[in-house]
Image: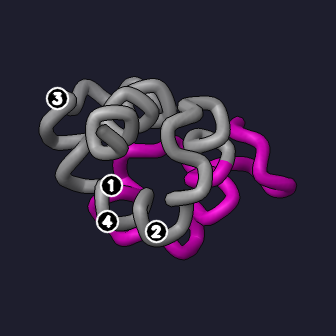
Amino acid sequence: MKAGALLVGLTFAIASSGESRDEQEHACRGDAFHFCASAIPNKEKIAACMKQHYDELSPPCKAMFDRPAKGGQKS
């Protein structure tokens, strides 16, 4: 159940990068569970959490996001 909610949350959290849903999930699943498990299944909270942890994300997951501006806001 949580994995499905995570996928939906990641789909909305990740910037439109032309990557498929499977690629997004594969790139960020571990990071989302590691950093943002308490936010699941709330997609807005997952998105905010992942952006807060941008500098700590794995390189493949980081590549799925636009780099946030200082202060955690996406540019």
For disc 3, the marked residue is 20
Q: Amino acid at mark 1?
A: Cys
- Crowding near pointer 3: few (<14 within 10 Å), some, many (20+)? few
Q: Are dots 1 and 3 in contact, CB under 8 Å? A: no
Q: Amino acid at mark 4?
A: Gly
For the view shown, which residue lies furthest in the right direction?
A: 71
Q: Position of residue 52 (x, y in %)?
A: 69, 58
Q: Earlier in the sequence, mark 1 or mark 3?
A: 3
Q: Position of residue 57 (x, y in %)?
A: 46, 68
For disc 2, the marked residue is 57
The span picked out in magenta is 49-75
Camera-near label (4 vs 2) is 4
Residue nearest the observer in this picture, 33 or 17: 33
**Residue ID at (75%, 49%):** 69
Whole-Å distance between the Cαs marked 3 and 2? Answer: 19 Å
Disc 4 is placed on an element classified as: helix
**Residue 30 image label:** 4
- Crowding near pointer 4: few (<14 within 10 Å), some, many (20+)? some
The answer to which quarter of the image holds residue 5 is top left
Q: Position of residue 10 (x, y in %)?
A: 40, 37
Q: Are dots 4 and 1 in contact, CB under 8 Å? A: yes
Q: Are dots 2 and 1 in contact, CB under 8 Å? A: yes
Q: Decide: is 6 above or below 43.
A: below
